[in-house]
Image (cartoon, grey):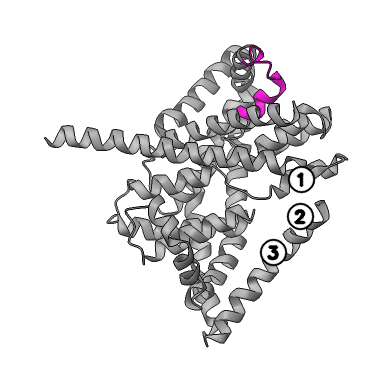
Amino acid sequence: MVEVVNLISVWLIPVMLLLIISTAVFRKVPVYETFVDGAKEGFGLAVSIIPYLTAMMVAIAVFRASGAMEALIGLIQPLLAIWNVPGEIVPLAVMRPLSGTGALGLTSDIIQTHGPDSFIGRLVSTMQGSTDTTLYVLTVYFGAVGIKKAGDALKVGLLADLCGIIAAIVIVMIVFG
Amino acid sequence: MINVIWAGLLITGILYAAINGTMDQVNEAIFTGAEQAVTLCLGLISILVFWLGIMKIAERGGLLALIRKALSPLAAKLYPEVPRDHPALGYMISNMSANMLGLGNAATPLGIKAMEELKKLNGNKDEPSRTMITFLAMNTAGLTLVPTTVIAIRMNYGSVNPGEIIGTTLIATALSACAAIMIDRFFYHLRRRKERRTNG
């Protein structure tokens, strides 16, 4: 099972490249020139995201470093205890939409402490895998095309994250609980 | 909303540090945070340059149009405001496919290309269109078939069965994607109602 998954993830990208390039060669597309043509935009795009991402990451770093995040987690933990949900997962639930690297660090940390096959280990694995870093996705996608107002996008994304976390808790409780 | 969150994070952070005595850490975090953001963007250069090049080949080679045709009935339901033969739809579908396969690196450039096309469709306004919000919601829901990173971590810490969370992850991610679609539709109808009220 695991070997198959690993094999697929190693082969996927090279096979995809093979497919893309061979169909283009077959249709007589000048592949090298086309590649260079498309790749030109990459540098400018990456640079244009810098101001958006800097703004967001500094704010999150300040919030974390001040200890305000821990205080917020402390407020949520007793609420979850009512439903028999382990408080250890609260930091991850708060971190997941804000910071991808932060969430990944927390996930590894919790798995290391509690073991990957414990209830908490399985729960954080599911939480980490089932949702993306909303604030990062929003900042990068809207930043790259110069959209400064987020509209309802942030509300929708954060509410969906909340649903995802609740779904993860409920499902892991049913399957592994 | 984004203004409130951004200012809120900074103001509560700094005020809390003043009470909590963590101003040292906050002072450091300001500079390390900025540095991390720039490093992250520089890291994106290689990914964007490479994949935007490959995607141009996929576009000219006709592969993107093929994917678009195959999945357009589904996409038309999800994104009713985009014309069926518009390139934005091809990019959005490819982005979703890359995300599902866990190819985050390939998904980001595709998503950005989709946003560029959607912005053109929206008359280059600096506000997001309905489709852009739906597309973003689908992306933040993180629809993945195989959560490779998590499996790798579990393997690292000696799990007996690292892949056993694939099933629960799939169900959770599918539910959160459904929730994202419903919440998105709900806010869209709120906006419509508000517009109608101000117009009439």
Instruction: Give how far apart the Cα atoms at labels 2 and 1 are.
Output: 9 Å
How busy is the neighbourhood of tag 1: few (under 14 within 10 Å), some, or many (20 plus)? many
Q: Amino acid at mark 3?
A: Leu
The residue under the point 68% across, 16% down is A84
Q: Which residue is mark 1?
A: B151
Main SS type for the magenta part? helix
Instruction: Give how far apart the Cα atoms at labels 3 and 1 are.
Output: 16 Å
Residue B181 place in picture, x, y as percent: 44, 41
Q: Which residue is mark 2?
A: A5
Q: Amino acid at mark 2?
A: Val
**Picture disc at residue A12:** 3
Quarter residue A122 falls in: top right
Chain letter of the residue beneath label 2 in the structure image? A
Quadrant location of the N terminus of chain B in the rendered image: top left
For mark 2, give the secondary structure.
helix
Whichever of callouts 2 and 3 sits on the residue coming sooner in the sequence is 2
Is residue B116 visible in the rendered image? The answer is yes
